[in-house]
Image (tube, helix red, strand yellow):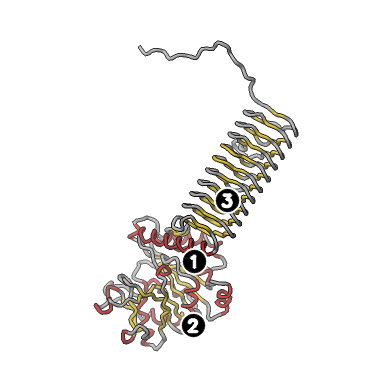
Amino acid sequence: MTTALTQEFATAGPPIDVVIMAAGKGTRMKSRLPKVLHQLAGRSLLAHVLDTSKTLRARNVVVITGHGAIEVEAHCASNAGVLAPLVLNFVRQEPQLGTGHAVQQALPRLADDGVVLVLSGDVPLTQPATLFHLIMASAGQHLALLTLEMADPTGYGRIVRAGGQAEGAVQAIVEQKDATLAEHSITEIYSGIMAVPALHLKRWLARLDNRNAQGEYYLTDIVKFAVADGVGVVAHKIDDAVQVAGVNSPVQLAELERAHQLRQAHRLMEEGVRLADPARLDVRGDLLCAQDVSIDVNCVFMGKVNLGEGVSIGAHCVIANAVIEAGAVIHPFTHIDGENVGVTVGKGALVGPFARLRPGATLGAQVHIGNFVEVKNSTLAAGAKANHLAYLGDATVGERVNYGAGSITANYDGANKHRTIIGADVHVGSNCVLVAPVNIGEGGTIGGGSTITKDTPAGALSVARGKQVSVAGWTRPKKTPKA
């Protein structure tokens, strides 16, 4: 929602209590993992729905669990910090006797003064703005249904209107298995999402029965009770099927993933990002891009990633929890993951191809990190270079340092990590081992193949390796002939 809409929502109408149905087994997923915990865009289906509830500033969220209840409840609890100040409650539906029976379990957790918003834990992409308008349609007194026109409504409950007219008053929702031949032709379907005053909901749920084709207690039967009681039933109709698409199989999950990613790609392009192919982009978190950013194919962005002006991302990169400043170039096949600490790539820096930046890597302006170089918990000042086949862990590297191919900081003694400090303008030759803790003085040179275990003076050449010996006339061993 926009900021203005959020502010309007916060002050409008009665409190909102959300009920999320997350008890289903998801048999067609063919997985031991509860259906609502399968991931879309790097987060569980249920997490998307909980995020939406938080955006709506819901007073209370009741998650109805059943199949895999322990896993689902633990997953929600593990995200409680991110969801704060959202208040989570759990109720279990055992056995599972239908959607109406599910919501009945939530009633003790619902105050009488609120509007209840019923959502499904396997419908992840409903937009907060859409739900805001649905709640406004309820106005604290009506039963409001989120509906959609579908060319093929098979499997969905049909919206039955007075006189069969498209704009007639809503009279009922008829489930697929209970629909007549004429009702099968109705193309306006119920999405499974409704907003209803709590007092009405409690009264109507008490009147449910299971006299239907499936022998279940249908939540949708409350529509006919509302009509009988003279309570207005309103439909908020949208034309965006992705917002109400549920996940029942791996095929549907993959289809919804691609639809979601394509929407994110179009949003980025509308903001000025150049995507080589919008169909080959995966954003599994928050990606913020400044002007003139370009992204090649098959890149994956996770967590929070911030790309500065003019940043170029090569093909097949995986970038998570990082800030990449203006003008930096990330060459193909680079892996950056800041985890909980973060990674920073400075202005104009060059990284990759085939480089790896781990948590705590901080690169200054114009730093070069080349192929097969790994950096972890290290700071490289402006102009420093490690161009080939190297490791920098727990290191502080000064300006304009040249770090040779095959060199490493030996930062771990088997029990503790230690830091290496490399002063400005140091040249470290190829195939060196800097055994931490050690301080390499400014302007110094470390001869290739050295193992440095002691601090070195500024401006000095330091060499620590065995003396070269040549044995004249030496003959290589020969293989012994087989008997």
Residue 359 x/y as whole percent: 59, 48
Q: Is residue 207 above or below residue 215?
A: below
Return the x and y of residue 141 as percentages of the image width and height.
Answer: 46, 84
Quarter of the figure with residue 430: top right
Residue furthest out toward the right: 458
| Above/below status of 9 relative to 388 | below
- In the structure shown, which secondary structural element does the residue marked by tag 3 occupy? loop
Q: Are marks 1 and 3 in contact (CB under 8 Å)?
A: no
Q: Residues within 10 Å of mark 3 (few under 14, many from 20)?
A: many
Q: Quadrant of the C terminus?
A: top left
Q: Amino acid at mark 1?
A: Leu
**Which residue position is annotated with label 3?**
338
Q: Residue at x 34, y 70 (%)?
A: 97
232 or 483: nearer the viewer: 483
Residue 64 drawn at (x, y percent): 43, 68
The secondary element bearing badge 1 is classed as helix
Viewed as shown, does residue 104 lie left or right of 290?
Answer: left
Marks 1/3: CA–CA distance: 25 Å
**Whole-percent x, y for residue 432 in the image:** 62, 31
Q: Which label's residue is closer to the chain start, 1 or 2?
A: 1
Task: Indicate which disc residue 50 carries.
Answer: 1
Q: Assess disc 1: are there few (<14), some (14-19) or many (≥20) residues with their C-alpha within 10 Å of its C-alpha.
A: many
**The disc labelled 3 sits on which kind of residue?**
Gly
Earlier-in-chain disc, 3 versus 2: 2
Specify the amino acid type for callout 2. Answer: Gly
Spatial distance from mark 1 to mark 2, Cα to Cα?
Answer: 22 Å
Q: Quadrant location of residue 234?
A: bottom left
